[in-house]
Amino acid sequence: MRKLGLLISAVLFSANAFSTTVHEFVPGLTLDYELPSNDPQVFSNVLFWTIKATCTIVSDTPEGLITIKMIRRTGTVNDQPLTAEPFDIVVKQGDKLQITANSGAQVELLNRADQTIKASCSSG
């Protein structure tokens, strides 16, 4: 019942804001995400606890550049603390990203590659 409530809340809270797509991690589920070229995507943790997720790049793109920027609260990617100062990460097929998002965290990802980058993420 708790997972169903979290899934429903994730659907209800997902919305477009200023042409930025907002996604929310849902514990215990594996979700596929698309990062369209040059279209900012915001990922949020609306829960009261820290979420850890593993995302595997499953894109056909040989290599892509993603700009990551922390919008609110704290989190990490591959144990690197996220800050408001954007930084770039190069990803390719099969790469795994370890993501931690504290309660209330929001992070923006911007795919700077020419093609959509896809990732399959599971959180616990």
Image (cartoon, rainbow, N blue to C red):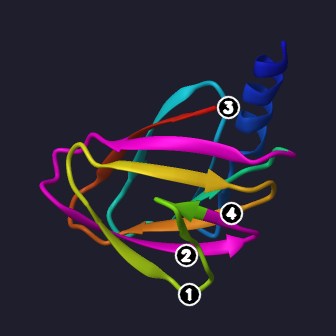
| Whether residue 40 can be seen here | no
Kindly identify the residue that appears in the image at 77 percent across and 44 percent down. Answer: 13
Where does label 3 land, which residue?
27
Kindly identify the residue that appears in the image at 80 percent across and 34 percent down. Answer: 9
Residue sticking out furthest to the front: 79
Where does label 1 land, which residue?
85
- Counting residues from the start of the chain, the first of labels 3 and 2 encountered is 3
Local packing at callout 2 (Cα closer than 10 Å; few below 14, some 14-19, many 20+) is some
Q: Secondary structure at mark 3?
A: loop
Q: Amino acid at mark 2?
A: Lys
Q: Label 1, label 2: how many angstroms apart (C-alpha)?
A: 6 Å
Cβ atoms at labels 4 and 3 below 8 Å apart? no
Q: Secondary structure at mark 4?
A: strand
Where does label 4 land, which residue?
106
Q: Amino acid at mark 1?
A: Glu
Q: Quadrant of the image for the N terminus?
A: top right
Cβ atoms at labels 1 and 2 below 8 Å apart? yes
Q: Label 4, label 3: how many angstroms apart (C-alpha)?
A: 16 Å
- Counting residues from the start of the chain, the first of labels 4 and 2 encountered is 2
Q: Quadrant of residue 28?
A: top right
Q: Which residues are magenta?
A: 48-75
Q: Amino acid at mark 3?
A: Pro
- Counting residues from the start of the chain, the first of labels 1 and 3 encountered is 3
Residue sticking out furthest to the left: 62
Name the spot of residue 85 as percent of width and height, x first: 56, 87
Where does label 2 land, which residue?
69
Name the spot of residue 43 as percent of width and height, x first: 61, 55
Residue sticking out furthest to the right: 48
Local packing at callout 3 (Cα closer than 10 Å; few below 14, some 14-19, many 20+) is some
Q: Label 4, label 2: how many angstroms apart (C-alpha)?
A: 9 Å
